[in-house]
Image (cartoon, helix red, strand yellow):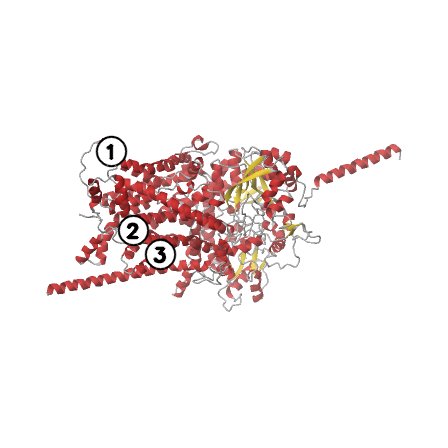
Amino acid sequence: MFSVKQASRTEYPMPSISFRKRIKKSLPYYVLIALPLIFLLIFKYYPMLGAQIAFKDYKVRLGIWGSPWVGWENFATFFQSPSSLTIIVNTFVLSLYYLIASFPIPIIMAIFLNECRSTGFKKFTQMVTYMPYFISTVVLVSMILQFTDVSSGIVNQLIQAFGGNSVNFMGKVEYFRSIYVWTGIWQSTGYSSIIYLAALTGVPLELYEAARVDGASKFKRILHIDLPHIMPTIITLFILNTGSILSIGFEKIYLMQNSINTPVSEVISTYVYKVGLINSNFSFSTAVGLFNSVVNLVLLLLVNSLSKKFSDVQVI
Amino acid sequence: MILAQANRKNQIRQRWDDNLFDVISTIFLALSVLVVAYPLLYVVSASFSSTNAVMAGKVWLFPVEPTLVAYQAVFTYQSIMTGYLNSAIYTVCGTAINLLLTILCAFCLSSKDFYGRKIVSVMVIFTMLFNAGLIPNYLLIKNLGWLNTIWSLIIPNAMSAWYVILMRSYFSSSISRELFEASSLDGCSVYRQLWSIVLPLSGPIIAVISLYCAVGIWNSYFDAFIYISKKELFPLQVVLRNILILNQVDMTTVADLRDMASRQGMSNLLKYAVIVVSSVPLLVLYPFVQKYFVKGIMIGAVKG
Amino acid sequence: MGKKMMRTLIAMVLTIALAMGCVSSASAWEPQWKHDEDLSSYKLCDNFGDIKLRFAVTSVPAIIDWETNEYVKWIEDVTNVDLSFELIPYDGRAEKLGLLLASGDYPDVFLSVGMTNQMISRYGVDEQMFLPLNDLINQYGTFTRQIFEEYPGSENAITQLDGKIYSLPVVNECYHATVPTKFWMNQTWLDNLGLKQPTTLDELYNVLVAFRDQDANGNGDPSDEIPLAGDYFDGWYTNPERFIMNAFTYYNLDLDKNDTSTYEAFGLYMNGDTVTTPFADPEFKKGVAYVAKMVKEGLIYEGSFTQDLAGLTQLAESGRLGAANGGYILFADLGGDVYKQYRAVMPVKGPEGYQGIISFPYDSVSGNMFTISADCKNPEAAFKIGDMLYSYAASMRGYYGVYNNAWTDADADAVGINGEPALYKLLKPWQETEPQNDCVLQMTTSRRDSKFRLGEPSDPNVDLYSAAGLETLLYQVTKDYKPYADDSKALPTIKFTEDENAELSVLMADLSTAIKEGMLGFFTGSKDVDTEFDSWLQDLNSKGLSRLTEIYQNEYNAQFK
């Protein structure tokens, strides 16, 4: 297990200071945190009171506070739908697949980049892999459709050149998830590797020297110095990502959806969108959003406590 | 003699290990570049091709029937320049405010002397998970009188829990506690610690968060869409979307088909040009940020 | 005859003549196609700016600035009202509008902002945020009442379930859009292979087989032709199975992936006075099996089910497409070489002799283009402006631009698209791409009935298959299709209560997915028609198909019987 041992993490026995002294010591921090805290209260917590419309039948004329209370009705509407279970499972599976598949690759890329001996090649690679992030979802999906086209798409042309048969990728249910995940990885790997690169720069060079003197190979060095150093970042990011597992993006799935892959591509956000098309009901969408948030919270806490147990890294 | 030989053997084996590693690394990176580059080239080539070539699917690697017609269409809209300018202003201001709040918050959360740290931590994370939804946020901005002002675009997202946590994690793991102890023994105040110790050593994380922030604001469309209805204040993404959408044939508003039909090809072409137009500034920004990803920022930080 | 009798006779004749005169002048209203028609009754106040109104309008790049637009200035000149504008961007305007309404933040008038029937039902009927217009129409709505007269049933169509009217519609009689499910086949290919246009389903089958197997496009390669293709994403009536299914039964099912809420997504149609769906009809099942066979044999392109219109266009433009459905030849570059190869094909007769095409007769007077807020301080003035927008003068200026700049009076001998005397003359072609500030294009209400649209001068020698000939081509093709259309089967506009809308929203989201999954599964062969069709039907019923039909039937009975 990766146990992160660093000087900053050594626990001193806390001398018992009196309560008043503790507050006094914290005073400068209170001053500094004032601005962020005010921000949070006004712009995050105050509007959150409005989330109560999930439990109400929101009427504009009556406002958020005056609208009639309907309890769990909006939630019931969502769960009573015969497809709600499939939809939730689809969201989960897709998100989990993406999380697990996409996680290691930016790390590997950052490590390789960090070890790159030629600065020119390093900068060039960084630059190029960073670019796909800027391709809009609309264009990305239209390229996917074009490249995977069963008769003229470049992917199938390559397959045929190697003697295989054309595959109707977007027309087969079983390919949807993989296409979604791997194109997402293609798009965001370079961009996500930046944070790991930044973390890697913090490794004290003396440690590298010591390792070289000891005769360690590059690989060993990465395993025992680099990785442990960025492990807090890795674990933190992983926990944070788990906290948004049900909030998978809407646009790309909606565009990639067709009536053949809906058994796996219908997720919570696309379903809520379709319901809203007919009868835009903010109470309903707020209720579903609240459900998402609660599940995300539970998962986050779960992963966080696991991490606390095994690695000393925790987000909460 | 034998020992020296053994050492030399060790050294040679290490180099062989390292060479293998380098080969694997280079292959991986080169493949990444290729896989990434082809679709990118496609986008750029398509944007410089003619509408007919794109319509017929003739573009594969290089521009076919090269024209500037898509770029002409984009740049003749008066609002494009205001779009660029507005986006630049929003990005710079927004990133600055974001950095301010994030650094303050992360710094406090990373210090064990902050009594109440756990509570604030939880408060921050909670906001990451729970969002009030469209209407309460809109009503708040409206009641503050911030509709159609720059404030609606840079304040509501002025601090993101993600970045706070990441920065806090960086502070905790990369800035050693000994520095703090030494300085407070010297009578250094907390404020001074933030200014003279933490900030100078946080080059990489500040660079990264600034980049992520700036990209996020530059690419954002939704907030402006919700809060801004005055043309002069539209950021670039809104302007570009408008151009795109109007060149798409909306079959439901069947008006005059001749005009609609002639626009059909243009809309496909514009998609690509719009990407190039909107991402060039960010691509130009990146090399400046790259400077900070240099090894050895911590050299000599801990002395004695 | 006595003198007395003579006088009585004369009196009688005179009375009758007078009465007849009155009757004829009251019922035969003819629009005044005059650019300077008399609108003096629309001067709403003495000094400019005495009345101020704020309008919510749609912002598009093609309209540079509403405040200084020539059309707006003309309205302000005529009415003396000072107008100011709140812009809603075109992209995503439904969301933005929903947000504005739901947050209670809106101006006096909503002009052409994409207000849906559900919004009227919720915010108008239910929450009374919009002003009922019935009294205003009766008192001041000169043009509005004329429209009601000319389009019987229109007043009923825009009256909500509480008996009140909350918005004014647009009159947009798009003749060719009444039959948008046209079928086009590559005539050059037919000529190359020496074949004639098919008239029965069997003939169609044989033609498509010939397209598939022989070198129809003359490039030396007999295997690159695709007989029939379509898309299910963003084309306009491009689903490839439509033409074939309509040889078996009435089939108006829209399987486009984004259509999850219109009645077409469920195939609803009228059978006499009963609202029905076609799924249980044995002919329907036969049709589905036939389409599945065609896909299996490569006669319908399997990529149709996943591609978008751009993909379909690529097929056509690369010279490989034999036939496709579409509102017009939208899968090819307008006026280009490929475009010119296609010709419309009339509906073919199926194995049982059924032959038909879908028509949509109800859309001329529709939409919620002009809505007044219940809090408006000058409801009369606001309404009068809305009424005035129906005048010929306003319609021309709103849609085309400035008189004598974009349009002018027709030449004496000019002939319109419909063969009758032209009603105006365009000085420059209408377009919606270049930014301009003379008019607001489609972003206003107006009266563009068929006379107006077809009154555009048409060169009798225009090449039908050129860009300029498009409207004429569609007019003629639509006329050709009309005899095959059964208007009585089309569903009229039915309104629903808030509660019904809430139930429908969830019902429709699930049901539409199940229908599309099933149909496409059958077509592509992943589901077998013989063994799985019946269980799919049962699944549809359990997902609420019968309840959907029930809701529609109830409201139909209440509103039309």
* Residue where numbered disc 2 is placed: A198
Dot 2 crowding, Cα within 10 Å, few <14, some 14–19, many 20+:
many
Which amino acid, by three-letter code, is at mark 3?
A: Met
- Depth check, front residue: C265 or A214: A214
Callout 3: chain: A
Residue A272 to residue C203: above or below: above
Which amino acid, by three-letter code, is at mark 1?
A: Lys
- Depth check, front residue: C149 or A135: A135
**Discs 2/1, front:** 1
Q: What element carries label 1?
A: helix
Where does the image place residue A126, in percent across and percent down from the top left?
33, 56
Where does the image place residue C259, in percent across and percent down from the top left?
49, 47
Query: What mark, if any, has residue A127 been given in the picture?
Result: 3
Which amino acid, by three-letter code, is at mark 2?
A: Ala
| Residue at the far left in the pictured view | B1
Dot 1 crowding, Cα within 10 Å, few <14, some 14–19, many 20+:
some
- Depth check, front residue: B223 or B147: B147
* Residue where numbered disc 1 is placed: A24
